[in-house]
């Protein structure tokens, strides 16, 4: 029965690859964010959906942006760092402090996302995952425990007003 149960489990994460990416993520974050080592980390993505309508042809195109997301329980701060799936570089950090945002909430439909409105006119939706097997679009990282900890922090501390 052991052989068949493994056969029908589906794909499993490559922990060696995941741990190597975990180390790269930590290095990028610590190099870019002041006191980066005081933050716990997960990865996620954000989507930019553009719609088009050319007469009879209607559709949409989605652009994926990968994110390194750090959170600090003591300072109630979330830092978002844009990056690419191979972790070859990153953009500048954006900091969200709990007492400086307009509102935050967890959206479960159509995808599980953590939404932050720093003011009334702009927002960021952070889609996070336990593990995705598409290295061309997403950062390869198994992060079940970290995602559970971030979810608890966000729902219990950050999304409360």
Image: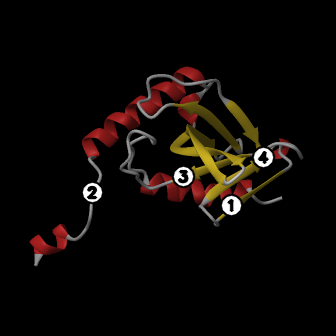
User: CA–CA distance between discs 3 and 1?
Assistant: 11 Å
User: CA–CA distance between discs 4 and 2?
Assistant: 36 Å
Decide which of tag 4 and tag 2 comes sooner along the chain.
2
Q: Which mark is residue 128?
A: 3
How packed is label 3: few (under 14 Cα within 10 Å), some, or many (20 or more)? Answer: many
Q: Residue at x 63, y 36 (%)?
A: 80
Q: Which mark is residue 12?
A: 2
**Percent coordinates x, y for residue 59 in the rendering:** 63, 52
The answer to whether residue 85 is left or right of residue 160 is left
Identify the residue at the far bottom of this view. Answer: 1
Residue that label 4 marks: 98
User: CA–CA distance between discs 4 and 1?
Assistant: 15 Å
Decide which of tag 3 and tag 1 comes sooner along the chain.
1
Q: Nearer the viewer, residue 141 or 39?
A: 141
Label 1, secondary structure: give it. Answer: strand
Decide which of tag 2 and tag 3 comes sooner along the chain.
2
Q: Which is closer to the viewer, label 4 or label 3?
A: 3
Q: Is residue 87 above or below residue 118?
A: above
Q: Which is closer to the viewer, label 4 or label 1?
A: 1
């Amino acid at each position: 029965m052991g052989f068949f149960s493994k056969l029908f489990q589906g794909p499993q994460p490559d922990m060696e690859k995941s741990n190597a990416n975990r180390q790269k993520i930590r290095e990028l974050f610590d190099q870019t964010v002041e006191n980066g080592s005081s933050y716990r980390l997960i990865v996620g993505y954000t989507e930019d959906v553009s719609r088009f309508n050319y007469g009879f042809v209607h559709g949409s195109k989605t652009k994926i942006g990968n994110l390194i997301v750090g959170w600090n329980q003591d300072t109630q701060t979330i830092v978002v760092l844009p990056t690419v799936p191979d972790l070859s570089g990153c953009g500048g950090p954006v900091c969200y402090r709990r007492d400086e945002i307009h509102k935050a909430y967890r959206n479960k439909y159509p995808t599980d996302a953590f939404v932050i409105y720093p003011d009334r006119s702009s927002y960021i939706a952070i889609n996070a995952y336990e593990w995705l097997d598409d290295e061309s679009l997403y950062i390869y990282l198994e992060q079940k425990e970290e995602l559970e900890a971030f979810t608890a922090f966000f729902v219990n501390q950050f999304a409360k007003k």
